[in-house]
Amino acid sequence: MNPLLQPWPWYVAGPLIGLTVPLLLIIGNKALGVSSSLRHICAACFPGKIPFFNYDWKKESWNLFFVGGIALGAVFCLAFMHNGEPVQLNPATIDALKAQGVQEFDELMPGDIFNWGNIASPVGLLFFVIGGFMIGFGTRYANGCTSGHSIMGLSTLQWPSLVATICFMAGGFIMTNLVLPHLMKWLLL
């Protein structure tokens, strides 16, 4: 068994991700964050008079290389390191999803949910477009995404990141247990 072709357990992957924070701080006094790259792209592409985008984005260009590396790494893994096996999920997760009507687990994303028919339906628009908007709004409102606050902010003992992480987790639990089951019923009709 080649370990590079298998999912790594959380106790290996989690510390490796966590060690990225001190590595970035030691190498160049940089803060881990992905969501800010969209702001840098907008500042580079639309250098208008919008105050939010009026800053020296070139100082943060390393972030764009970091995010680009993540995307290239994903493409590389998909092209050369895919083992052909279905995505491995916890059996309890599969049972919970089956109870909500999801039956396809062969692809990275369940085809029952992520298909063109669902995207074009009113419930699909609510599910994908409004959901995506809410994630973007939450990220902007919290002044950072989950990785920025929960990995970088907590490791540097920032109080706002603790509040943001608690809110992210509470929102995730509420969405998963109270809202998503109802949306899944409508989406999978």
Image (cartoon, helix red, strand yellow):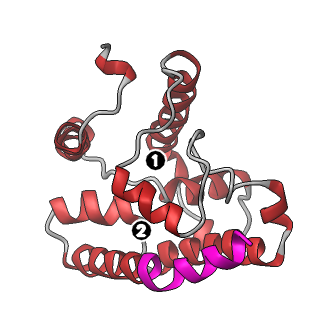
Separation of disc 1 and disc 2 at Cα? 18 Å
Left or right for 29, reference 85: left
Residue 189, located in which quarter of the rendered image?
bottom right
Label 1 vs label 2, nearer the camera: 2
What residue is disc 1 on? 59
Which range of residues does the magenta coloring cover?
Answer: 175-189
Instruction: Inspect the image, locate mark 1, and give the three-letter code of the amino acid beneath it.
Output: Lys
State the quadrant of the N terminus: top left
Q: Report if residue 126 lies within the magenta region.
A: no
Q: How far across and how far down the image is residue 39, in percent?
A: 57, 60
Q: Is residue 137 above or below residue 103?
A: below
Q: Residue at x 49, y 41 (%)?
A: 67
Q: Is residue 66 above or below residue 181?
A: above
Q: How many marks?
A: 2
Give the SS element for disc 1. Answer: helix
In the image, 4 versus 34, the foreground residue is 4
What residue is disc 2 on? 144
Q: How far across and how far down the image is residue 14, in percent?
A: 22, 45
Instruction: Inspect the image, locate mark 2, and give the three-letter code of the amino acid beneath it.
Output: Gly
Q: Residue at x 26, y 58 (%)?
A: 152
Q: Is residue 132 above or below residue 179?
A: above
Q: How far across and how far down the image is residue 115, in percent?
A: 76, 54
Dot 2 alpha-carbon crowd within 10 angstroms: few under 14, some 14 to 19, many 20 or more:
many
Q: Report if residue 179 lies within the magenta region.
A: yes
Residue 11, located in which quarter of the rendered image?
top left
